[in-house]
Image (tube, helix red, strand yellow):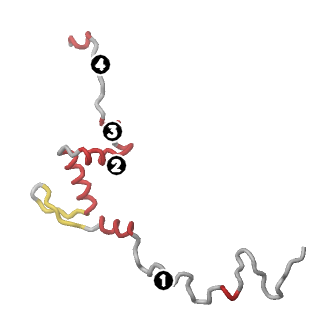
Amino acid sequence: MNKKKSASYDVGYGKPPQGTRFQRGQSGNPSGRPKGSKSPLQQLRAAAREMITVTINGRPRRITKFDAMCQQLINNALKGDTRAQRLAFSLLGDEGGVEKWAPINITISPTDAKL
């Protein structure tokens, strides 16, 4: 096989020609994400951590927006909102899911019923 070798530089996988490389100090994505910008998930987390004042049992309390959302979800579930109930149970998962809240079937023998 006859391989062509340049006297100064080999071109191949991971070795682009020197003329097409980025110049020193030049970014590969000059109009990319600005420095300091936050992702949507970071913005959501920051908003959930903000403090608000709510009235609980006639007294003002400062809690996070996330805590207020959790209390609203549980309150709506208690009022009979089936979507809120389903969401609350799914969020509780293994720690307190439907399995733990399901009614227990108990059978009473005739001798125990007399007591």
Secondary structure beneath dot 2 equals: helix
User: What kind of residue is marked 4?
Assistant: Thr
Return the x and y of residue 49 as percentages of the image width and height. 30, 66
What numbered label is drawn on residue 107?
4
Q: Which residue is label 2 attached to? A: 91
Give the distance between the C-alpha atoms of the residues marked 2 and 3, in whole angstroms: 11 Å
Give the distance between the C-alpha atoms of the residues marked 1 and 2, in whole angstroms: 40 Å
Return the x and y of residue 33 as percentages of the image width and height. 46, 78
Return the x and y of residue 48 as percentages of the image width and height. 30, 64
Q: Is residue 103 above or below residue 27?
A: above
User: What kind of residue is marked 2?
Assistant: Leu
User: What kind of residue is marked 1?
Assistant: Ser
User: What kind of residue is marked 3?
Assistant: Val
What numbered label is drawn on residue 51?
none
Which residue is at a point 35% across and 70% down the rendered structure image? 43
Rendering quarter of residue 7 = bottom right
Q: Are marks 2 and 3 in contact (CB under 8 Å)?
A: no
Which residue is at a point 14% across and 57% down the rendered structure image? 56
Q: Residues within 10 Å of mark 2 (few under 14, many from 20)?
A: few
Q: Quick one: quadrant of the C terminus?
A: top left
Q: Which residue is label 1 attached to? A: 31
Q: Are marks 4 and 1 in contact (CB under 8 Å)?
A: no
* Sequence order check, earlier mark of 3 and 1: 1
Give the distance between the C-alpha atoms of the residues marked 3 and 1, in whole angstroms: 50 Å
Q: Which residue is label 3 attached to? A: 98
